[in-house]
Image: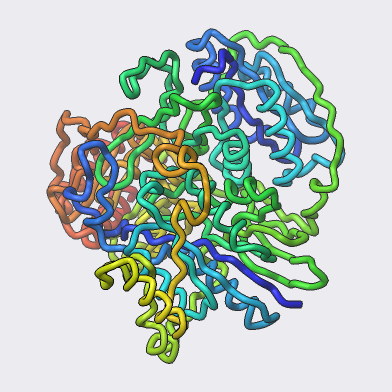
Amino acid sequence: MKCNSIVMVKQVPDTSNISGEVMRPDGTVNRAKLPTVFNPDDKVALELALELRDRFGGKVTAITMGPAKAGDLLRECLYMGADDVYLITDRKFGGADTLATSYTLSEAIKKLGSYDLIFAGRQAIDGDTAQVGPQTAEKLHIPQITYAEKIIDLKEGKILVKRRIDGGYEILESSMPLLITVLKEAATPRPFKARRLMALKNARTRLELEKEASSPEELEKLIADYASKGLYIQTWSREDLGIELERCGIEGSPTKVHKVESVVLSSEGHQQIPPTSEGIGNLLDSLIGEHFFG
Amino acid sequence: MDNGSREVWVFIEHHSGRPADVSLELLSKGRKLAEKLRGPLKGILIGHEVDAVAKEAFRFGADELLVVDHPDLRDYRTLPYSRILCELVEERQPRVILYGATFIGRDLAPRIASNSASGLTADCTDLQIGDATWKKQQHQDLLLQIRPAFGGNIVATIITPDAKVQMATVREGVMEMVPLDAPCDGKITKIHYEPTAADQLVRIVERHREEKRSNLKGASIVVAGGYGVGSKKTFDMLRELADVIGAEIAGSRAAVDAGFISREQQVGQTGLTVRPKLYIACGISGAIQHVAGMQEANRIIAINSDPNAPIFDVCHYGIVGDVASVISTFTETYKKKLK
């Protein structure tokens, strides 16, 4: 049986590279100042979808909600082997929390039409909430399997998945459509294919083409031109989706940052211990005297 | 958007007829929040043959339990559990719902939040009831959801002033587990469960579960390593030290990501919270996310080659030096003292 998958991917700030200047005074992150990466768990999700397609046939579509810069992420999806990619983007989507994000993504998925599986990474490294996957599944009224470790089998419209639980694992059999969030251990993402990279490196989103066009007419022409070469990345705005403004972006986000405090770690001061046998010996003597060991 | 309700709910997770520790911790915290809200604390208990779990829940302060008992519900499955809870929320409109940030809680809570358009804050390290002004409007008795923010030593207070129901997940060990002095039996309200076709879409074929082997949570000494440990080889030296002094081994998130140690042994906001007598932090810089999980240790020793590492601001004893050489000296010196 063929298996059509949609993969929800996200471009995230590289959290291993955070410096002071990227934090705004209100505690939110100035993402423009951070280097970005393909969220690691999402890359694994894409790999799993590609593996299923290679085995059973079908199509893999990657979608992301993000700013213009996310075009880079979608090109990477193409280099790995995604058949189709979509950028869901609008100024009005800015500041979205997980609820508003899941609303926007679920509406985009509805517009994409039918699918067998939706994949997403377990969580994104910039928030670690692991919420958007289940929130999207709820909005689409479909079942979910989170923390998937392995896809065991797919046959007769049913899928068999091994997932992690507290202290062990379980094997679940589910009907489709189904949303699956995957653990990093579930697969090793394939490298970019050189041939695809050469063929698709000029793929462009509407936002990217807007920068090259001097008039709306020229933009339309550019889009048609790129599309005819298979190099146009579908770009959907809020209007394209026809969705409610008050449920998108910061407007549609119930969670608000009320207060941000710098943590002043206790300034009581500590005792300096020299890194020598003698220094450490004295410390141990006092700890042993206070019965810390044994 | 105050819905007029003053109810605090705790989703009670249970395994093999016992409540999860995190649920008892949340009941203990929920009791304080409910007192502040001047409302009842209610436990949501879904399962089969859960009398013993109910008894424990009352011992930790639940005023009332909403119990959904059915053979089909013995083990957690997303669909029936989330549907049941969504319906209960819709019908009864609690003000606050707390979930453990476990595999189950993190699978379940987002579905309820999505369905009821509620705010949900993951991995809170503190919860309070308090007033807040948002967009020039004064809101009374909001759930203040406190958690370290992304990047830097910053703690954010999240509020959901326009949501009727306010939700948060909390990791095991973050809140203290405090039974009532004089436990009393609360009220049990049985909720009828009618299986639907959608509830059967996902079937458990096999389940394997062991009680946690990690002794980290209750350990009296913890040796923890961070990214600054540098290599697996040096990390093995920490394991040797832990063996020699009778400690449990742990790591920061960076150490887990670097593959030095397993995720089950991660200490910090997105891992375990520990309260040992002695915590030895090796090559750990001291990001707030890590400090949140160990700052209540009785005594902290920090070893780091960077004299400006923030970990030195929380420790009691600071050793500036190369981690490998300090640990080797530490281990050898301790062995000599034993003789």
Number of residue marks: 0
- Is A193 located above or below residue A208 in the figure? below
Whether residue A289 is visible? yes
- Is B268 located above or below residue B126 in the figure? below
Q: Which of B150 and A217 is in front in this view?
A: A217
Residue appearing at x 16%, y 49% in the figure: A21
Residue A13 falls left or right of residue B35? left
Q: Position of residue B251 (x, y in %)?
A: 39, 53
Residue appearing at x 42%, y 13% in the figure: B140
Q: Position of residue B131 (x, y in %)?
A: 38, 15
Whether residue B126 is visible? no
Q: Position of residue B311 (x, y in %)?
A: 23, 44
Q: Nearer the viewer, residue A11 or B231?
A: A11
Q: Which of B252 and A153 is in front in this view?
A: A153
Instruction: Specify the farthest residue to the bottom.
Output: A195
- In which image quadrant can residue B276 be found? top left
Position of the C terminus of chain A, as image quadrant, is top left
Residue appearing at x 48%, y 11% in the figure: B36
- In which image quadrant can residue B20 be found? top right
Q: Where is residue A229 in the image (x, y as percent from the top left)?
A: 44, 85
Residue A82 falls left or right of residue A172? left
- Is B96 located above or below residue B300 in the figure? above
Residue appearing at x 52%, y 54% in the figure: A241
Q: Which of B59 and B2 is in front in this view?
A: B2
